[in-house]
Amino acid sequence: MTVFTLTEAEREAFLLPRLAALTVRHRDACPPYARILAAIGSEPPYARVADLPWLPVRLFKTHELRSVPRERVFRVLTSSGTTGQAPSRIHLDREAAAAQPRMLAATLRTVLGEQRLPMLIVDSRAAVRGPALSARGAGVLGMMNLGRHYTFVLDEGGEVDSAAVRAFLARHGGGRFLIFGFTFMVWLHLRELGLDLSRGILIHSGGWKRLADQAVDAAVFRGALRRECGLTRVHDFYGMVEQIGTVFLEGPDGGGLYCPDFANVLIRDPETWEEAPPGVPGVVEVVSTLPTSYPGHVLLTEDLGVVHGIDDGVWPGKRFSVLGRLPRAEVRGCSDTAVPA
Amino acid sequence: MSHLDRLRDVFRAALSLPEGTDVDGLEYRAIPQWDSLAHMALVAAMEDEFAVMIDTDEMIDMSSFAHAARLLEKHGVSAAL
């Protein structure tokens, strides 16, 4: 059972009615969202997913956008946010809160299998403790549902605890195990271990911003981990708290990120806001059927990306990469003025 | 001791609740002690106590004591044990 099955045409046919229905549902239940749609003159019917009105992600930092009454809010998630910015606030009812870890698990099951695997966490136990959990800690906790026998690679002081990792490998290193960490943490700490991690499946996320300065891209990253740790099963993923539970997962060959069946990605030309063809970079828009309790089903991100190909990779649908954050001036431009025509 | 009594003890120990606390009506996140991290400790403790393997979906869906009791039955842990 995998959630990477739909070709681009099948995906469009599957998503359009569902996302259009969500647009109407959120419009009827979320007055600020209804005002935005009214202001930009967006009305059904929508002929294509690309015609659906998008919301700039930063609106979740400035507006309380929810489609359920306050008493039905079960959890409020917050993003880390850039320094000086208010965090995003994402309102989940019980149903949405239950769906998101399930769909995350369904997505990662494609590369991890059914069973929870022994898990090496490239972080410190301190990251998941305490009442005020960081976004990083929340990410680690979310992934822990997929693991068991958790071992943290870093000690409480943030130093690599190679004795703990050796003990983990002695016990679990003979079978498949899961390694999870944020991309820059993996790059910083996993290689220095000098241990054989060849039975591991690495899932990492968090973006390349901090590694781009060192000229480390996906190919360099994969190459170094293969040479230095024997790691051949490496999967990056792209996701955001504003579309919690939806992750775009790197395929086994490293040929780009793929969309689960309940989601898709569109690249928009920042000049015309038309969809950019494969090979042409632009602003990343993400769509997903998971946001049912807040209007996050069609989001314009602040990331630059490019589609490499459509229905031409190891899994069907679009194959894409995220190239980095938009320059700040452009970010301001899109979120303040970018509205669908 | 019945499997339900053993399950009650596992809950109290994993969630650091005082001995004798009534846990039968407990729901995930309804008390501060039953948070995400405690949930993982709870699942691990159930696996150890009853020698079962709980998969990801079962772990995510185990949202109350009643669910946990049903999950054990699904795994063949019954009153006879």
Image (cartoon, helix red, strand yellow):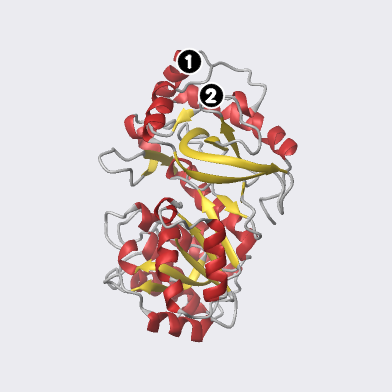
Residue at (53%, 75%) from the top-left corner? Answer: A229
Number of marks drawn = 2
Q: Which mark is residue A40?
A: 1
Q: Secondary structure at mark 1?
A: helix
Query: As shown in the figure, which amino acid type bears the numbered disc 2?
Result: Pro
Residue at (36%, 36%) from the top-left corner? Answer: A71
Above or below residue A275? Residue A85 is below
Is residue A120 among what the camera can see?
A: yes
Above or below residue A265? Residue B71 is below
Q: Quadrant of the C terminus of chain A?
A: top right
Residue at (69%, 34%) from the top-left corner? Answer: A12
Query: As shown in the figure, which amino acid type bears the numbered disc 1?
Result: Ile
Q: Secondary structure at mark 2?
A: loop
Q: Residues within 10 Å of mark 1 (few under 14, many from 20)?
A: few
Residue at (42%, 75%) from the top-left corner? Answer: A192
Q: Position of residue A166 (x, y in %)?
A: 44, 84
